Amino acid sequence: MEEKRTTLEDIVSLAKRRGFVYPGSDIYGWESGLYDFGPNGVELLNNIKKSWWKANIYDRDDYVGIDSAIFKHPKVWEASGHVGGFSDPLSECKVCHTRIRVDKELGAVGVTADEKMSEEELNRLFDENRDKIKCPKCGNKDFSDVKPFNLLVKSNLGDFTGEDKRPVYLPGEACQGIYLNFKNVVDTMPVKIPFGIAQIGKAFRNEISPRNFLFRTRELEQADTQYFVRPNENKEAYERIKSDRWNWYLSLGIKEENLRWKQHDNLVFYASDAWDIEYNYPSLGFDEVEGVHDRTDYDLTQHMKFSGVDLRYTDPVTREKYIPWILETSMGMGRIFLAVLSDAYTVEELPNGESRVVLKLSPELAPVKYAVSPLLKNKPELVEKAREVYQILKKKHGNVMWDDNGNIGKRYRRQDEIGTPYCVVIDFDTLEDGTVTIRDRDTTEQTRVAISSL
RNA sequence: GCGGGCGUCGUAUAAUGGCUAAUAUGCCUGCCUUCCAAGCAAGCGAUGCGAGUUCGAUUCUCGCCGCCCGCACCA
């Protein structure tokens, strides 16, 4: 049997028609790079978050969680390097439209330039050296002016003058909130190094071209952990973290053959090591879901410099003071959501020649835990009993769906597409002996069990 | 941001310079139905936005918005 490969379009279509993901601001014609989660999507998203929180905080003794404000002091983004370095000075060949990184091209002809220079300065240097730089693709020397592309989103929080004198940025990455609270956590909580802080937070980026559904969006959510260790005592913890993260993906039921590790070729100057976990997305192939980075003491050092506050940690026994090193994990929620959805998406051939679409989500992640149906809608005694069972299950399992639409087969198929693991059907036997049928999503087999044992 | 392609009910497709824009599915209501998308009836629901040409534009032209592919970008 030949299997048709799932495309990203299949996933997008299902996501919309089954209430997982809608285009952002849909009735106004959609704003690029933004998506809204629907009733089933928010359940799935929250279940992924719960699982992540449990694995990173509740299942360990050395992590605590925080939730920091989205808006932060303007200096945070100077310290982090985002105001200067989150942008690239680009110029475009007017002949073939190839783009060049101006700082790098200048460097190649022996002119010192870097991405932290002002736009004017870069343009002056570029103009002086235009005759030495030619397009790597077509060889022409006719370039547009240098334009920096800064990915930070700016806001006017607290600026009532409209003069933009004190730009406040939305976070380009969520993890800064953790560094900002490192001292607070150390001063108020019973933690000692090595320990970690975890957070799920929003980030915003002016991506030039958001694309590929949830994979690259302008507003994103990140699940981050930062693990603080003694300087140079990073290796063992790094390996432990890598292995924990890998196992978490497997615990979600993601197929191992769709996952792989990829080490960064070019490390940023302060990093000691960096690996990504990649998922084999439909249409896109393997791409990053999460980064696991060994960042040395860079982040806290920067904030010490810019804030003037001593962020060193004092060893409770030796009284030694040091800036801890940081091991970071940073996962894109949209990316893991897309990975989970894609991995669960299954098209099955049925014996009668038809096919069914099933989301084989692990029960822990499934947005709807049970669907409850009366076998027949026009038999009040069945409906009444089914309502009872529905209420019992709802109390126990949270998101349980009442489904009495059409006929029973239709309901099964609908629930298959949502990924509901079990459908409970109340029939005439239920009235006699208090048992119901449970239909299994993956095998489509039915078993009879007592209501009391559900 | 550049080049190419594209934009019709929630989804997947059709058609048209002029009559009520069609079909399937979905959703919803009623009937029916004793376990895998059965059937009957009613309803909801679309030409992305704006301008131009025209007596008349969903159709042709332009701008904007958005999507897809390629390039570039992805700290």
Image (spheres, helix red, strand yellow):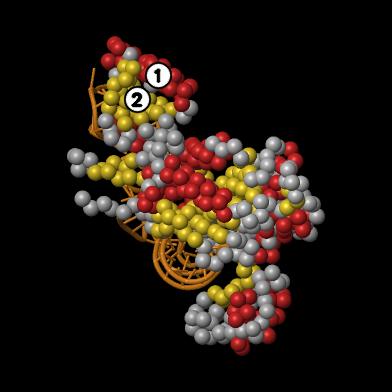
Q: Is residue A390 above or below residue A323?
A: above
Q: Residue at x 76, y 46 (%)?
A: A319
Q: What amino acid does circle 2 point to?
A: Val
Give the x, y percent position of residue B34.
23, 22
The secondary element bearing badge 2 is classed as: strand
Of residue A65 and residue A99, the one placed in the foreground of this image is A65
Measured along the vertical axis of the image, is residue A150 above or below residue A339?
Answer: below
Chain containing the residue with disc 1:
A
What type is the residue that disc 1 sits on?
Answer: Val
> In the figure, is residue A365 to the left or right of A141?
left
Secondary structure at badge 1 equals helix
Q: Which mark is residue A84?
A: none
For the residues marked 1 and 2, what is the alpha-carbon distance in whole angstroms?
Answer: 9 Å
User: Which circle marks residue A389 in the picture?
Assistant: 1
User: Between disc 1 and disc 2, whose residue precedes?
Assistant: 1
Q: Is residue A93 left or right of residue B6?
A: right
Proximity of marks 1 and 2: CB atoms separated by less than 8 Å: yes
Depth check: give the residue in front, A445 or B54.
Answer: A445
Q: Can you give x and y, in whole percent of width and height, for residue A115 in the image?
A: 66, 70
In the foreground, A373 or A257? A257
Q: Residue at x 48, y 54 (%)?
A: A277
| Residue B1 picture quarter | bottom right
Q: Position of residue A452 (x, y in %)?
A: 38, 16
Q: Can residue A145 be seen?
A: yes
Tell me which residue sits at (43%, 32%) in the image.
Answer: A368
Mark 2 sits on what residue? Answer: A424
The residue located at (75%, 50%) in the rendering is A320
Which residue is more in the foreground, A67 or B59? A67
Image coordinates for residue B5, horizontal then vertical, percent:
39, 66
Figure check: A409 above or below A192: above
Which corner quadrant holds the C terminus of chain A? Answer: top left
- How crowded is the residue under tag 2: few (<14 C-alpha within 10 Å), some, or many (20+)? many
